[in-house]
Amino acid sequence: MSLSSTLYAKAQTLIPGGVNSPIRACKAVESEPLFIARAEGSKIYDVDGNGYVDYVMSWGPMLLGHADPVVHAAAKAALDNGSSFGAPCPAEVDLAEKITKLMPSVEMVRMVNSGTEATMSALRLARGFTGRDCVIKFDGCYHGHADAFLAAAGSGVAVQAAPGTPGVPAATVAHTIVLPYNDLEAVKEAFKARGKEIAAIIVEPAPGNMGLVLPKPGYLEGLRAICDEYGTVLIFDEVITGFRWSLHGAQGRYGVRPDLTTLGKIIGAGFPVGAYGGRRDIMEKLSPCGPVFQAGTLSGNPVAMAAGLANLLELEKRDYAALEKRTGELADEFAAIIRSKGVPVTLNKVASAFTMYFTDRPVTDMAAARTSDGKVYTAIYKQMREQGVYLASLGYECSFTSFAHTEADYDLTLEAAKRVKL
Ligand code: KE4
């Protein structure tokens, strides 16, 4: 019995499902989770000493690669000065300044500890700013596990078929309107019916939680225009896309300015950090300068701030275009290998992210994503993992590369793909 299996058996007696986040249980791919001992660059190593080329990258944060020496040095130096003060520290100002410089629409920013906290707080702020209650979200988009969003969410809940989850009162999602992504007409209909009640639209500008889906031309611009027409707050959930789609996020790439942006993952470089920010007139409604309350003991943690800032400073020196080109080539070759086995593949790719759907349809929303053959994904997941390639434990996720991935990694990945039997 492997040490991973032994640990998993014990973990399940102490932690629900043996994991601290459901997706890690690998249920959707009929596998046991690997317990990871360490990670470095593009690799992770399980407790039994097996190494894997990693395309999960902690679900997005590790764009520089695992255990980046510059990031770790900054975190260690900060740690030597103490781990938490419960008072403001210079690193919070430095990271806030860097984020506002890099994200075109973010004039002010508030640090929190996760993407969930960021989206939950951004929605409360939008409701407080507009005095309205309704929020539009899109089927297949995942914004963390705050109650208001667990209505036909993506990432995880999508696999559980029934939208939403027990424990969320109907009253809580009574103000949540769930629409298909990439369908502007549906948004216009909703505004015709309830426009004056709608506080916010929250959208992953290019969703990563139904797998990767790209915005149709004009879609984001259409959301912007309708929000302007009705005085609704447009929230871009850039927890995945922020600093990955470009140094200026998806908003920088697509040229559409939201009113609020939520961030996470990369801004913490693997430490627990989330953030939300945007228009000054909205952000200044936040306590203590405004009436909308939000707080957090460990928000702006000095160690996490130091790591996050070091991460962004390093990313500013990296060649995003080259990484996008190389990631696209890998994805194209990977998809071609799978197609050569007689399986239809729709490939969506952008920046350093891609998703293969095993369907012959284009995938522009959750309904189309659901036509992907999950059994094919499971077979690929298992056989790739057996050959040292670590893919997302759910088909409705992205594969991520990083600045640490090497030609040897890509060669190993494609050789392993060639050996997959479907
Ligand atoms: P967290 O609360 O997990 O830090 O962030 C929630 C969140 C918000 N918005 C977007 C676009 C997100 O993708 C996420 C979290 N992403 C998932 C995987 N795609 C986290 C993995 C997990 O749940 O363990």
Image (cartoon, rainbow, N blue to C red):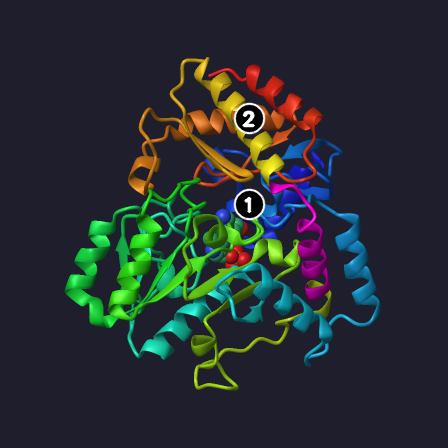
- Looking at the rendered structure, the secondary structure element under dot 2 is helix
Q: Main secondary structure of the magenta part?
A: helix
Quarter of the image holding residue 300? bottom right
- Residue at 30 percent of width and 66 percent of height: 228
Q: Looking at numbered disc 1 in the image, what kind of residue is underneath it?
A: Arg
Q: Tell me: is circle 2 under 8 Å from ligand 1.
A: no
Magenta stretch contains residue 311: yes
**Label placed on residue 385:** none
Q: From this view, report whether residue 295 is shown above or below residue 48.
A: below
Q: Which of 169 and 97 is in front in this view?
A: 97
Quarter of the image holding residue 324? top right
Which percent across, then down, holds residue 213? Answer: 40, 41
| Residue 73 falls left or right of residue 322 | right
- Residue at 40 percent of width and 18 percent of height: 343
- Residue at 43 percent of width and 47 percent of height: 155
Q: Tell me: is circle 1 under 8 Å from ligand 1.
A: yes
| Circle 2 Cα neighbour tier, 10 Å, few/some/many (<14 / 14–19 / ≥20) | few
Q: From this view, report whether residue 353 is shown above or below residue 345.
A: below
| Residue 303 falls left or right of residue 418 | right
Q: Name the residue under label 2.
A: 329
- Residue at 67 percent of width and 71 percent of height: 92
Residue 22 in view of the camera? no
**Label placed on residue 24:** 1
Q: Looking at numbered disc 2 in the image, what kind of residue is underneath it?
A: Glu
| Residue 338 falls left or right of residue 35 | left
Which percent across, then down, holds residue 125? Answer: 41, 74
Q: Mark 1, mark 2: which one is toward the viewer? A: 2
Give, as a single range, the part of the protein colored magenta.
305-320
